[in-house]
Amino acid sequence: MNFCSQCGDKVRFAIPEGDDRPRYLCDVCGTIHYQNPRIVAGTLPVSGSKVLLCKRAIAPRKGYWTLPAGYMENAESTQQAAVRETREEACAEVELANLYTLIDLPHINQVYMIFRAELVGGFSAGPESTEVALFEEHEIPWDELAFMTIERTLRHFYADRPLNAFPLHISMVTPEDRERYFGSA
């Protein structure tokens, strides 16, 4: 950030008085520009013994498989965001169950919130997907998943399914985890 969105003057990056971390500050109008993590909300849509995955039509990770998820918009709840993203990416309607995975990615300022959901009706590729399909566990394209958060959610699901108990799983992806998953690319 170079300029204040309130008055247009130059900003500086410093720790405001009484704060503990650097922020963009405008000395002209006094605005402190807070930047907060982005919430990625989505679903783990299930139909019988199958899970619905979408092949990404957009960057990042174009051509890789993911659960329907995306950035939460202002003025919507996390549940509304999860349902909207499922509708946008998979043209699918779902009935939400519980919040299933909450995964922090502090190094890229994101929080993933994935809800278990029951697929209701049909599905097709939306504008952000080239393909949408249902997969049995043995059919999951594990080496073609877009993000570590998606793999982690699926692994929890398949471990929990035989017990028919689906507790909330809270975890964090570190830069080291990310490096192991993506390699040096």
Image: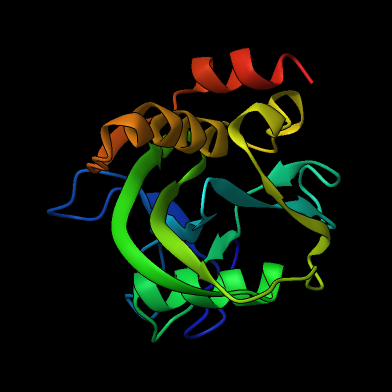
Numbered label tally: 0
- Toward which corner of the image does residue 145 lie, by quadrant? top right
Quarter of the image for the C terminus: give it. top right
Please determine whether, in this image, residue 123 is positioned above or below residue 15. Answer: below
Q: Nearer the viewer, residue 27 or 39?
A: 39
Question: Residue 68: in sight, yes or no?
Answer: yes
Image height check: is 40 above or below 88?
Answer: above
Residue 10 location (% of width, % of height): 55, 68
| Relative depth, front residue between 87 and 5 | 87
Image spot of residue 183 (x, y percent): 71, 14
Q: Is residue 96 left or right of residue 181?
A: left
Q: Is residue 44 left or right of residue 144?
A: left
Image height of 166 relative to 87, above or below: above
| Residue shown at 65% from the left, 27% from the top | 138
- Residue pushed farthest left? 18
Inspect this view and state whether residue 72 appears.
no
Residue pictured at 38% horizontal, 26% vertical: 159
Instruction: State the residue in front, 46 or 106.
Output: 46
Q: Does residue 45 lie above or below 33 as drawn?
A: above
From the top left corner, tell me how far across and down residue 120 is, in percent: 53, 74
Residue 52 at x, y percent in the picture? 63, 54
Q: In percent of the image, x 25 and y 55: which residue is there? A: 16
Which scheme is used to colour this image of the protein? Answer: rainbow
Residue at the image position 35 percent from the left and 44 percent from the top: 101
**Quarter of the picture holding the N terminus:** bottom right
Residue in the foreground of this view, choosing between 142 and 146: 142
Q: Quadrant of residue 54?
A: bottom right
**Residue at the front extreme?**
48
